[in-house]
Image (spheres, helix red, strand yellow):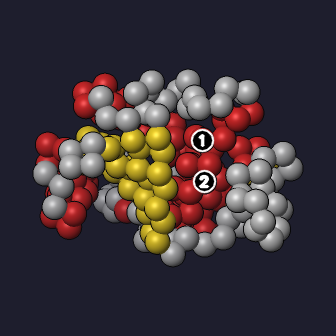
Amino acid sequence: DIDYAATRLDHYRYCVQEYSGIPMKDIIFVSSDKSSVYHAEAKPEFDLCPVFFIAVDHRSKSIILSIRGTLSLADMMTDCIADTAPFAAAGRGAVGHNGIVQAAELVRERGAAALEAAAVATGYSTLRLTGHSLGGATAHALAISLTAEPLRQSSPGKLPANLPPSITRIDSIAFGPPPFLSALKLPFMAPGLPP
């Protein structure tokens, strides 16, 4: 029997290494894409979590979480779940693109153990989130939720308890992200920006 899950993850890990130049030993975690498995026993599954990987960058002493843009049918479904959902992390009364808000939460849940392992192993204090299109918007939503929590808990300067204590800085860089937040003026926006 062929272990389709292991084969798929090995393929993703190889692709990350091949296209990014990141050494295989520095790729800590690669998520799977359940919607791309096609074999006789396959049942359609639509998982709203986009494919992502976690790696370490020794030059910048940071942990990288990179989220793939729309590619699979499941990603397209995430794009299409465009009704609004409460996004409390962005501020009181804020709403966001439902699919992207859900995707960010799933990436957060599924990447937590690997992030902790990378932080403990390296001691690096910077988490860099990045992605393209759907992945970029998901990275921004995740960055907002990770950095906004301490503001709501009246603990300025501290990141959420579910992040490793060594993580003290979060950066988010997105390429071509779609809008995913309401047009409300949000508390983290710079003063003077129009609503």
Q: Residues within 10 Å of mark 2 (few under 14, many from 20)?
A: many
| Residue placed most toward the observer, 22 or 8 | 22
Q: Nearer the viewer, residue 37 or 147?
A: 147
Residue at the outermost front position:
192
Q: Residue at x 48, y 45 (%)?
A: 170
Relative to 99, 55 lies left or right? left
- Determine the residue positioned at 14% across, 48% down: 24
Q: Nearer the viewer, residue 159 or 162?
A: 159
Q: Quadrant of the C terminus?
A: bottom right
Q: Amino acid at mark 1?
A: Thr
**Element carrying mark 1:** helix
Would residue 34 be found to the left or right of residue 16 on screen?
Answer: right
Residue beneath label 2, please?
141
Residue drawn at the location 27% of the way across and 43% of the way down? 61
> Is mark 1 in CB contact (under 8 Å) with mark 2?
no
Instruction: Indicate the amino acid at tag 2.
Output: Ala
Depth check: give the residue in front, 94 or 113. Answer: 94
Q: Residue 56 at x, y = what percent?
A: 26, 44
Quadrant position of the N terminus in the picture: top left
Point 45% across, 24% down: residue: 165
Does any portion of residue 79 appear in the rendered image? yes
- Residue lying furthest right: 93
- Image quarter for residue 157? top right
Q: What label does residue 147 carry, if any? A: 1
Q: In the rendered view, tell whether residue 166 sits above or below residue 96.
A: above
At which x and y percent is residue 107?
A: 49, 46
Q: Is residue 44 left or right of residue 89?
A: left
Residue 12, position in %: x, y? 25, 57
